[in-house]
Amino acid sequence: MGSEGKPMLPVLDFTIEDLKPGTNSWLSTCTSVRQAFEENGYFVAVYDKASIELQNGVFGSMKELFDLPTETKRRNIFEGMPLKGYVGQHPKIPLHESMGIDPGTTLEGIQSFAEKLWPHGNDQFWLLAHKALEQNEPQLGFVAHTDKSFTTILHQNHVNALMVETTNGNWIDVDFSSPTSFVVMAGDALMAWSNDRIKSPNHMVMMNGNETRYSLGLFAFYRGILKVPEELIDEEHPLQYKPFDHLALLNFTYSANMKAYCGV
Ligand SMILES: O=C(O)CCC(=O)C(=O)O
Ligand SMILES: [Fe+2]
């Protein structure tokens, strides 16, 4: 792990210009994003438009949320939505707790979530949370896996713990402790849609230290059937996947991979 010195993390800077679709800078950024996905399956995005006040507010609310009694947190039940529900006290990953809000990008979705947890109101809470608890020795926070999303965007407080497996099989620590760093990662659906040109990276959370880590994840899912575009199929890249229902992938056995789900 990192024996040849500090491993290089692919970093893309989104702070330089206001990226308007169709402009030259937007087009060249699209190319960089595609290359980073094709080469690594993930990258660290540097983005400075989320103020420190906003971030302090979000992480403060996440502490408040996870400090609630377990019975209260369990009021956020799964109800068949892809990532909805509370997960915690799982014997295999005792440090892990997460709270899924679905839909998490609409005001109604977040309001209905907040009303369940704070029937008397809480106008501060607004986004999803994902947390690992304190410990003294390196300990698994979340098992190695690939995401079933199309893409995942992660943000965290100052506590690093995310590890990603590189294409040559080394595990590297991902430093995204800066308030302007976000991890963007390909999920299994992007891997299948891209006809294996992009690989969804294996990753896990390894806690080390005694500080609580709060992380936020935005998991993008497509409601409908995804199909490999014709232009991504050629002699070098014969078709690898049949059209597939993205949401139904979530009901497929968790350990199964994309090839088993919809491989040609
Ligand atoms: O907490 C993190 O940074 C990553 C969590 C994760 O991999 C997941 O929820 O799928
Ligand atoms: Fe993940």
Image: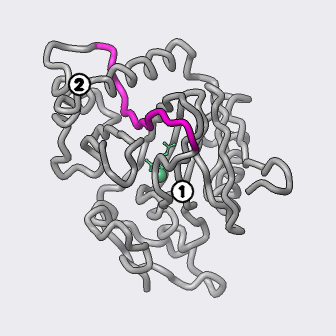
Q: Based on the displayed image, in which of its 4 quarters is residue 166 positioned?
A: bottom right
Q: Nearer the viewer, residue 124 or 62?
A: 62
Give the distance between the C-alpha atoms of the residues marked 1 and 2, in whole angstroms.
Answer: 29 Å
Mark 1 neighbour class, 10 Å CA radius: few under 14, some 14 to 19, many 20 or more: many
Q: Give the extent of the magenta segment.
A: 123-137
In the rendered image, the vertical position of residue 220 relative to residue 136, given as above or below? below
Q: Position of residue 46 (x, y in %)?
A: 67, 34
Please tell me whether mark 2 sits on a helix, a strand or a loop.
Answer: helix
Q: Nearer the viewer, residue 199 or 19?
A: 199
Q: Residue at horizontal 54%, vertical 30%?
A: 210
Q: Based on the displayed image, in which of its 4 quarters is residue 50 positioned?
A: top right
Q: Residue at horizontal 70%, vertical 62%?
A: 170
The residue indicated by pointer 2 is 114
Q: Residue furthest front?
A: 136
Amino acid type at mark 1: Ala
Mark 2 neighbour class, 10 Å CA radius: few under 14, some 14 to 19, many 20 or more: many
User: The N terminus appears in which quarter of the rendering?
Assistant: bottom right
Residue 186, numbered label: 1
> What secondary structure prevails in the magenta region?
loop
Q: Nearer the viewer, mark 1 or mark 2?
A: 2
Q: Residue at horizontal 71%, vertical 68%?
A: 168
Please tell me whether mark 1 sits on a helix, a strand or a loop.
Answer: strand
Q: Is residue 258 magenta?
A: no
